[in-house]
Image (cartoon, grey):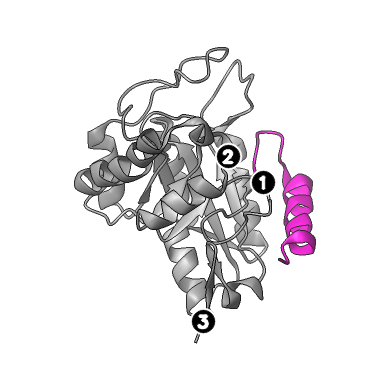
Amino acid sequence: MTQTVSNWTWQDTARPFPYVLMYHSVAVYGQDPYLVTVDPRRFDRQLAWLRRNGLRGVSMRELMRARQSGDGRGLVGLTFDDGYADFVHNVRPTLRRYGCTATVFVIAGRLGGHNVWDPGGPRKQLMTAEQIRGAAEAGVEIGSHGLLHQHMPELDDGELLAEVAESRELLRELSGQDVTGFCYPYGDVDQRVVDTVQAAGYDYGCAIWRSPLSGRHALPRTYVGDRDGSLRMLAKRMRHELTSKR
């Protein structure tokens, strides 16, 4: 029998963390002060590199299920934070071309809005409700990135619950999916936040950095940027292999 400790299990601790790539926006750009944008041509080459090296990008839902069944070899999680509208035109066609899937973490309270939390950068359009429905119907996993993109450890209990639980209900109704994944804005997470996400019924959570909280509900991810060509992609893959043990 598997014993549960904090947000992962004894069974999980014996396995390396899954390899998960973190993207945000994929678009042609002039300014990118927060380093959240990858040019579509670069993104195409990054997926091509994965496939040449025997790897396939998949949604977190597919990755977690495969690992649970012991069949996750060669799978890499592809995640896109914030739910930018350029996902529809610049990401989905490339995913199809390379036989990949992905997870988009959507900000449920800002559908069709802009990235107001990045005041020093260019305005980027967020996906509309219609675009999210279309992505879900096409097999893209929809996850929650909260309601308003806030620093969650700074919220009181009521605000935190709204960010976690209300966002899930809104996205479940919109997408028709169960919405089993949560992604922490800014990668900010503490034990109270992790416990709230787990208690709300999410199957997994995505953080950014590895920490004492790392586990199924605070999975570390690897940042991918526009400077990441073949050599840097290889270096990041090797670093994951060397550091992914728990």
Q: Amino acid at mark 3?
A: Thr
In 3D space, how far apart are the residues under numbered discs 3 and 2 (Cα atoms)?
28 Å
Q: Is residue 153 left or right of residue 125?
A: right
Front one among 20 and 8: 8
In 3D space, how far apart are the residues under numbered discs 2 and 1 (Cα atoms)?
7 Å
Q: Identify the residue under disc 1.
A: 209
Labels 2 and 1: the sequence-earlier one: 2
Of helix, strand and loop, which one carries label 1?
loop
Q: Which residues are magenta?
A: 223-246
Looking at the rendered structure, which numbered label has been put on residue 187?
2
Neighbour class for label 3 at 10 Å: few (<14), some, many (≥20)?
A: few
Q: Amino acid at mark 1?
A: Trp
Of helix, strand and loop, which one carries label 3?
loop
Neighbour class for label 2 at 10 Å: few (<14), some, many (≥20)?
A: some
Looking at the rendered structure, which numbered label has been put on residue 139?
none
Task: Based on the picture, tell me whether residue 130 belongs to the magenta stretch.
Answer: no
Q: Amino acid at mark 2?
A: Gly
> Residue, x 72% and y 62% (percent of image)?
244
Labels 3 and 1: the sequence-earlier one: 3
Q: Relative to 142, say whether 131 is above or below.
A: above
